[in-house]
Image (cartoon, rainbow, N blue to C red):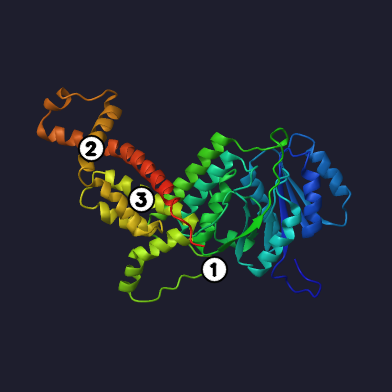
Amino acid sequence: MHSEDGQKKTHDIVALAPTFNNERTVIGIVSRALERCGSLVVIDDGSTDGTRALLDAWKKAHPQDDVRIVRHDVNRGKAEALKTGFDLARRAGYTHALTIDTDGQHDPDLIPDFMRASEANPDSIILGERDIRHPDYPTRSRFGRRLSDLATRLETGTQIEDTQCGFRVYPLRIFETISCCMGRYAFEAEILTRAAWAGAGIRNIPITCIYQPAGERVSHLHPVYDGLLGALIHFRLLGRTLVPIRFTRVPDSIGGESAHRSGSGISRLASWFSPRHLWRQIRNDPASRSTVAAGVGLGAFIGSLPCFGVHALLGLYLAKRLKLHPLTVVAGTQISMPPMSPVIVFASIWVGFTMLHFKTPVLADFTDLSVWDLFGQVILEWTVGSIVVGTILGVTLGLATSVALRLIPEKR
């Protein structure tokens, strides 16, 4: 897009409104979004109700406005609808895209707040942050949001709030570098992590959310299927985080938030290990207590694995890659010390034998084997069982740590 003097605008924003079977709310949302943004693209993702006819009639009533309506023949999911909108916006010359849902939860009156925040931070993703303490906030959504926020923090080392909120502004330049593989709602979690890896800024602004009564809510989120997709993408992203290969960066240092290392290697190492820093983190930043608990839980999982002698080293490596305080992980690995270590080893072998042979072990299962066969069998059973036992211990110890940290008063 261009200004009146023919110069290309450096900040030209368009609202993207993906919709699927939202005939009751879509016209009200897109009308107010157009009024507040000035440019609008509606992506009808294969609606089968009256949405299409309503949008056609509404478009005819706005012949002079900057409105585009594109359609998918069949429902492809929110991710594909957003990608269609991003491609169209880039080809039309827009620099930024604001995404808003049409189910009535996002308030279009907040669009000017997003536009001002984006103009002040043009290289950053502007992300809405809903009040998680709102009495109408669904309990299931609250739990899923906390897990998603924690996973994103482990992947990026950045505290990003409300990673599941779809009310956002994207600088379209990031899509020249970033590509996402997940569909449906998992796309919106994946893009934040990959954007942080690429060096793009991510900034939250508080928003209000409209929660309709249970009988009036129109949601196309499938709790089980979309929950599994969300878990899968975070599993993949966490796995990529552990690989010591540099991430592709957005050209020209978009985001302007480069990491600057100061001081000697010894001073940085001392700062990394500093228990004082850990205590300040716990007291000053309640949101970081979840990462402290995650570090202890991860350490307990590592301590359960059959790799005696390198538990601490493995814990330090994972703490570095996941941006966790090293003392929390190392503390968790101490579960491998007596008197717990014999119990964990016995439980792991017992669980591994049961899983591999579909029966509980008895002494005769081990006495008829040669030394080498016995050694190989026990190592395999120990390894398989330790993953299960370690997961249980890690989750249990992590939750216990989280509860204990709530007893520490927050610094005011």
Residue 149 coordinates in the image, percent (x, y):
52, 51
In three-dimensional space, the C-alpha distance between marks 3 and 2, rounded to whole angstroms, equals 19 Å
> Label 1 belongs to which residue?
251
Q: Hey, what amino acid is under mark 3? A: Val
**Distance Cα–Cα, label 3 vs label 1:** 37 Å
Dot 3: element: helix
**Residue that extends furthest to the left in the rendered view of this protein:** 371
Q: Secondary structure at mark 2?
A: helix
Which one is nearer the viewer's eye here, 333 or 198? Answer: 333
Residue that badge 2 annotates: 343
Identify the residue at image location x=77%, y=42%. Answer: 25
On the image, which quarter does residue 273 sit in? bottom left
Q: Is residue 369 left or right of residue 166?
A: left
Callout 1, which amino acid? Pro
Residue 321 shows in this picture: yes
Residue 296, labelled with which disc? 3
Q: Residue at x 64, y 40 (%)?
A: 76
Residue 80: horizontal and vertical position, in percent? 63, 46
Q: Which label's residue is closer to the chain start, 2 or 1?
A: 1
Dot 3 and dot 2 residues touching (CB under 8 Å): no
Task: Report the front residue among 354 and 145.
Answer: 145
**Regarding mark 1 in the picture, which secondary structure is present there?**
helix
Q: Residues within 10 Å of mark 3 (few under 14, many from 20)?
A: many
Q: Which mark is residue 214?
A: none
Q: Tell me if 253 is positioned left or right of 165 in this view.
A: left
The foreground one among 326 and 412 is 412
Q: Residue at x 37, y 41 (%)?
A: 396
Image quadrant of residue 27?
Answer: top right
- Label 3 vs 2, first from the N-terminus: 3
Going from N to C along the chain, the mark reached first, 3 or 1, is 1
Camera-near label (2 vs 1) is 2
